[in-house]
Image (cartoon, grey):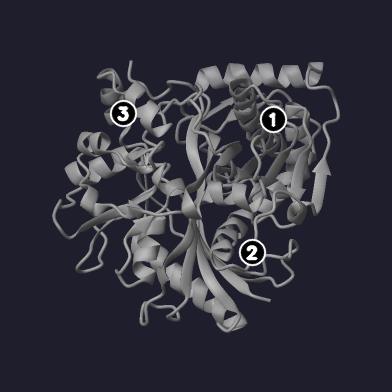
């Protein structure tokens, strides 16, 4: 069968995977993964080494090709952590310093200043985003104003997909696509082109940015000597969350998915018409197919989800591996009143508070590590419930089912809690790597080896039905404690 190799350049690792798109179980199972180093130079700053990202792409792609060969590979798809930005010199190919990661909060004061100038309504209307350091524009502005990046004819700046594509083509192609570009705060959502007013506001020269092309289509081919075999078509690109929406088969308006990764990201397909951006949520481009067939999505972004499990492991040392979280949390019937708000990098949807910080409330002498683990799992479900609740209110449409993926979705306890809190079935597909499947599907569509399906190929997995009524006293008590703890976490880092 024809195979597509998906490159998944995530926040904590880079992986490559060969997929037969007609196999929902991934029986082929050829993949490679490498961890990506995290750099934290100060509490507000999160950085990656762009050269390391590229080295890991080369290593993982070559490992997969060594195992499956190139004869059956019809193309490459790319998916990536969004909002993270890289600046580099086109002549030398060298990055200017480290990439600034989506979790980075160094530009919070710049966002405050723009908000004080009354610019947020204009930015929100054009981009569908809120003024928050999460997005790329203020990061790029910081690079150019404070980071020593020269603004000249050799400057290239873009999200991680652009950096990988540029290296795969040995500098021949500088391009991106709308799902990534719509996260920069520089793209007009309606026209899907770079906005001249926003470029001027943030001081970003359009010549440094990539051309915005459809998400599915031939971007170029791998260049001989680039580090991976030459001549492979690069035919699909999408930001990780939009790729997961596509990979989950959410092709019809009203279909939604949640990815429990480093953060949690709920996306709902809202069709081909650009909707107004509701309070607390984002409007984003889901994907653009050939001949201008665009799909939009509402999104709720939770900054810290799986990263809270990493904190239990690396920060507190109460678990040795992430796999221990579920069994440890399930060893107690409740968190015994302990609530953890994992606002390590502020709060995203629906609060959008860059100054919120992590909070642990309700600790007693009887609190154990199991209660802390249970509180983290509950926080993952409660944060996503807040987003789903805002999304249903904004869209006016009842949520009938939630499709889930990402590393933490292996925890049955998490998905049972999510189903109970939200009052809808939660569907976990057999193939949890929806992000790479979506990138591969966009590439396979462009190369004519796959056709979109809205449902059937993903209907292999596990369904979690809600058990108690959503308004049960136990669930309402949990929501009440959560809301009280969130209020205590908000605005914590604001100087008084």
Q: CA distance from mark 3 to mark 1?
A: 39 Å
Which secondary structure lies at badge 2? loop
Query: Splitting the image into 4 quarters, where does residue 225 fall?
Result: bottom left
Q: Which residue is mark 2?
A: 450
Q: Please, what secondary structure does the residue beneath circle 1 have?
A: loop
Give residue 257's position: percent from left, percent from top.
Answer: 65, 41
Question: Which image quadrant for residue 326?
Answer: top right
Foreground mark, 3 or 1, reads 3
Residue 349 in the figure: left or right of residue 22: left
Q: Residue at x 39, y 33 (%)?
A: 127
Can residue 403 be seen at all in this image of the molecule?
yes
Q: The N terminus lies in which quarter of the figure?
A: bottom right
- Disc 1 target residue: 367
Q: Residue 66, which numbered label?
A: none
Q: Earlier in the sequence, mark 2 or mark 1?
A: 1
Ranked by sequence position, the earlier of labels 2 and 3 is: 3
Earlier sequence position, callout 3 versus callout 1: 3
């Amino acid at each position: 069968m024809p195979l597509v190799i998906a490159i998944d350049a995530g926040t904590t690792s880079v992986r490559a995977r060969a997929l037969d798109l007609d196999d929902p179980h991934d029986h082929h199972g050829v993949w490679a993964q490498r961890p990506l180093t995290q750099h934290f130079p100060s509490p507000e700053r999160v950085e990656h080494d762009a050269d390391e990202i590229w080295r890991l792409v080369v290593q993982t792609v070559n490992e997969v090709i060594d195992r499956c060969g190139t004869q059956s590979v019809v193309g490459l798809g790319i998916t990536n952590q969004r909002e993270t930005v890289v600046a580099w010199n086109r002549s030398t190919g060298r990055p200017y310093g480290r990439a600034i990661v989506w979790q980075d909060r160094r530009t919070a004061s710049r966002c405050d200043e723009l908000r004080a100038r009354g610019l947020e309504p204009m930015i929100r209307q054009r981009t569908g985003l809120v003024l928050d350091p999460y997005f790329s524009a203020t990061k790029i502005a910081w690079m150019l104003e404070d980071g020593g990046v020269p603004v000249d004819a050799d400057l290239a700046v873009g999200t991680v997909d652009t950096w990988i594509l540029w290296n795969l083509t040995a500098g021949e192609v500088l391009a991106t696509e709308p799902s990534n570009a719509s996260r920069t705060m520089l793209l007009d959502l309606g026209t899907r082109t770079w906005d001249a007013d926003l470029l001027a506001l943030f001081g970003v020269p359009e010549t440094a940015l990539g051309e915005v092309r459809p998400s599915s289509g031939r971007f170029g081919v791998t260049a001989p000597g680039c580090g991976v075999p030459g001549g492979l078509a690069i035919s699909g690109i999408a930001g990780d969350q939009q790729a997961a929406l596509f990979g989950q088969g959410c092709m019809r308006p009203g279909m939604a998915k949640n990815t429990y990764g480093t953060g949690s990201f709920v996306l709902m397909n809202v069709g081909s018409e650009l909707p107004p951006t509701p309070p607390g949520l984002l409007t984003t481009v889901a994907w653009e197919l050939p001949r201008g067939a665009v799909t939009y999505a509402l999104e709720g972004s939770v900054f810290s989800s799986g990263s809270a499990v990493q904190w239990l492991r690396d920060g507190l040392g109460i678990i040795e591996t992430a796999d221990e979280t579920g069994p440890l949390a399930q060893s107690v019937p409740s968190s015994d009143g302990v609530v953890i708000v994992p606002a390590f990098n502020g709060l995203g949807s629906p609060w959008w508070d860059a100054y919120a910080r992590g909070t642990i409330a309700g600790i007693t002498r009887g609190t154990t590590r199991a209660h802390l683990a249970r509180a983290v799992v509950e926080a993952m479900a409660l944060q996503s419930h807040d987003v789903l609740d805002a999304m249903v209110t904004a869209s006016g449409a009842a949520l009938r089912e939630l499709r889930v993926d990402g590393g933490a979705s292996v925890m049955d306890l998490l998905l049972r809690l999510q189903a109970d809190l939200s009052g809808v079935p939660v569907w976990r597909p057999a193939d949890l790597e929806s992000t790479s499947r979506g990138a591969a599907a966009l590439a396979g569509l462009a190369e004519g080896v796959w056709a979109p399906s809205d449902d059937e190929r993903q209907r292999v997995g596990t369904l979690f039905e809600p058990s108690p009524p959503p308004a049960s006293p136990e669930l309402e008590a949990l929501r009440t404690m959560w809301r009280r703890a969130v209020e205590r976490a908000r605005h914590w880092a604001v100087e008084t």
